[in-house]
Image (cartoon, rainbow, N blue to C red):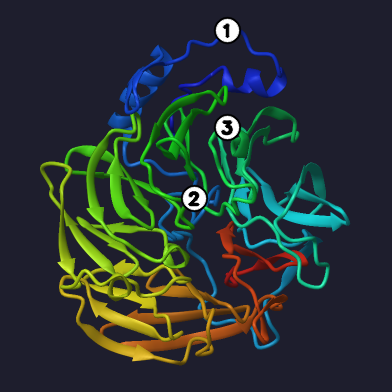
Amino acid sequence: MATGRPNLYARDRTLCRAAQPGPEPTPAILGRNHVCWPWHLRVGQAVLSLLLPLGAPAKDWPQWRGPNRDSVWNETGILQTFPAGGLQVRWRAAVGAGHSSPVVARGRVYATGSEGQKPKTWERVQCFDERTGKRLWTFADEVIYRDSYNPANPSGPCGTPIVEGGRFFNLGSTGHLVCLDARTGTVIWKRVLTEEYGLEQFPDLTSCPLVEGGLLIVVIGGKPGACVVAFDKRTGKEVWRALDDPRTFSSPIVISAGGKRQLIVWTPKSVAALDPMTGRVWWREKLDTPEQYVVATPMYHDGLLLVSGLMLRLDPNQPSPKVLWPNTDAPLARILSHTCIPMIQGEHVFGGKLSGRLVCLEARTGRQIWETDKVTGLKNGATMHLTANGDSVLLFTDQGNLIRARLSAAGYHELSRVQLVEPTFLFGDRKIVWSVPAFADRQVFARNDKELICASLAAKP
């Protein structure tokens, strides 16, 4: 995932060409959270620790929320105001139902979706040429959903896949975990987690997989002690499992703090930090939360860890947290929104609230500075996704609008707004779009339940 990253796994490309790799050393499980590592994972992690921080090439958006999983887009030459007639759409492609985000890597765009022909349903992965939108390959996986497939308002996968090291990893909503050759779509390995980890028959998994060193980490709420499971990304073999917590809609992140790499996981029972290489629990903050509210991805910035509406300060010398705000254990007081992910910029937090309003808070105290109802509608399910770009922010709403705005303690200053995609998913009495866009190569990639579009955001020279 980094520019200039050494090829620690040179045999990865061989695995993409051959489905039958040679014997692979496996870790010896010494206990639930203690592992004796194969040499290639130990050496790889040691070298990676010297190279941190890591990132993907600037032009790629290979996973949930971008190269560093923080919803920051560093590309320059981007439109500050949008054309009155809308953005230039370079191509469109049918993708099927789902709320997952597209991802972009090495000139290719990947999107997941579902297609139903009663009584069967397939979850599909499609790979497109980034420049032309030509479909290069399709992988289809037959699954069974909780409800029969409804063409008028279909269900689909919600977890965003990840492309890394020439491979495509995806966790489907029914617990099918697959590793594909990112170039050809050939299956390298596959695991059906519902059968192996005691998941309910229709688990509806939405947490996005994460790659750390030689591991693919997923949060599934499995049993026993398998809320979080790490697999060898080359072989699909389990390396460690941790936590007895139920499943979560939130996706994990990995940060460096307190002299350690910390895997941050938010579940309905706690916010926990694990050693990403062993599953050992570094620390855990109790947080009993209604399951449907455990959605936002944690945000980390300059020693502060924000989990929806709970702000923690992490000790710089050891893996340990301190609650900064709020000054209450009431679960809903610690939730800003169950659909929006807040962001930290400097000394302030910006994020959507349950009401659909955008608010500005002091990062160190949680004191509200201002709020506005100008971003999206004030209805249940209102959503805004914030992506930092230069001196302003790109906001994508449940109404399918893309907004560029400047956010500061002085207030909300909207620069431009454009309709990007049509809302198609029926939620209550209105239609919405919840999929988060991807940004790469001065373009935005957005989808609804019908199509994926690629639109230009390049400013004129």
Reading the image, the residue beneath label 2 is 58
> Toward the viewer: 224 or 418?
224
Please state the horizontal and vertical placement of residue 28, each as a whole percent of the image.
Answer: 39, 14
- Mark 1 or mark 2: name the one nearer the start of the chain: 1
Reading the image, the residue beneath label 3 is 196
**Front: mark 3 or 2:** 3
Q: Residue at x 51, y 77 (%)?
A: 383
- Mark 3 or mark 2: name the one nearer the start of the chain: 2
**Front: mark 3 or 1:** 3
Q: Decide: few, some or many residues near mark 1? Use Cα within 10 Å; few <14, some 14-19, many ≥20.
A: few
Q: Is residue 3 visible?
A: no
Please, is residue 379 above or below residue 53 in the view?
A: below
Kind of residue at badge 1: Pro
Q: Quadrant of the C terminus?
A: bottom right
Please state the horizontal and vertical placement of residue 161, each as a whole percent of the image.
Answer: 59, 47
What kind of element bears circle 2? Answer: loop
Q: Is residue 353 visible?
A: yes
Reading the image, the residue beneath label 1 is 23
- Mark 3 or mark 1: name the one nearer the start of the chain: 1
